[in-house]
Image (cartoon, helix red, strand yellow):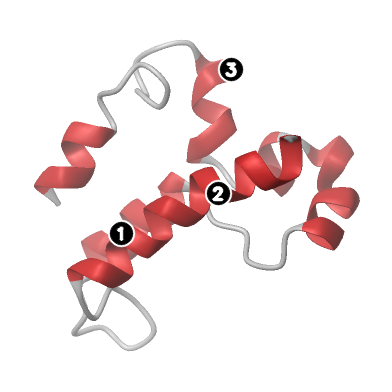
Amino acid sequence: MQVLQKFMKHDWVNEARDKAKLYCFYLPVSEAFPAIQVDYERRIPLPMDLGTTKRLLSMGHHHHGGGFDSPAAFAEHVFRVFANAIEYNF
């Protein structure tokens, strides 16, 4: 959780900063940008956002259907957020 808390303070994703920047990574694309939802879902098979990652992390692995089994699983979720953004936009 400490790693994610530090990460969430970065200017690109800080909740206390510009909300336009926050939406790019913190909310699901379908919620933040409903106008591109259909195209995004067609092109991105595994959507992920930092808000979902944060919720999963706070649930812990002992809850059925939540949390992460390993640090690598957590890292994969964070990586997926940015990999999806790159794939969709470039």
Q: In this view, does 10 lie above or below 83?
A: above
Residue type at mark 3? Ala
Crowding at dot 1, Cα within 10 Å, few <14 / some 14-19 / many 20+, comes out as few
Which residue is more in the foreground, 88 or 19? Answer: 88
Quadrant location of the C terminus? top right
Alpha carbons under labels 1 and 3: distance apart? 24 Å
* Nearer mark to the viewer, of 3 and 2: 2
Residue type at mark 1? Ala
Question: Earlier along the polypeptide chain: callout 1 or callout 2?
Answer: 1
Crowding at dot 2, Cα within 10 Å, few <14 / some 14-19 / many 20+, comes out as some
Q: Which mark is residue 83?
A: 2
Apparent side of residue 18 relative to residue 46 in the rendered image (left or right): left
Say whether marks 1 and 2 touch (CB < 8 Å).
no
Residue type at mark 2? Ala
The residue beneath circle 3 is 20
Seen at 42% across and 21% down, the residue is 12
Q: Which mark is residue 37?
A: none
Question: Earlier along the polypeptide chain: callout 1 or callout 3?
Answer: 3
Element under disc 3: helix
Alpha carbons under labels 3 and 2: distance apart? 19 Å
In the rendered image, residue 45, in percent from the top left (x then y), is placed at 71, 67
Q: Residue furthest front?
A: 90
The residue beneath circle 1 is 75
In the rendered image, residue 70, in percent from the top left (x then y), is placed at 20, 76
Seen at 41% across and 60% down, the residue is 77
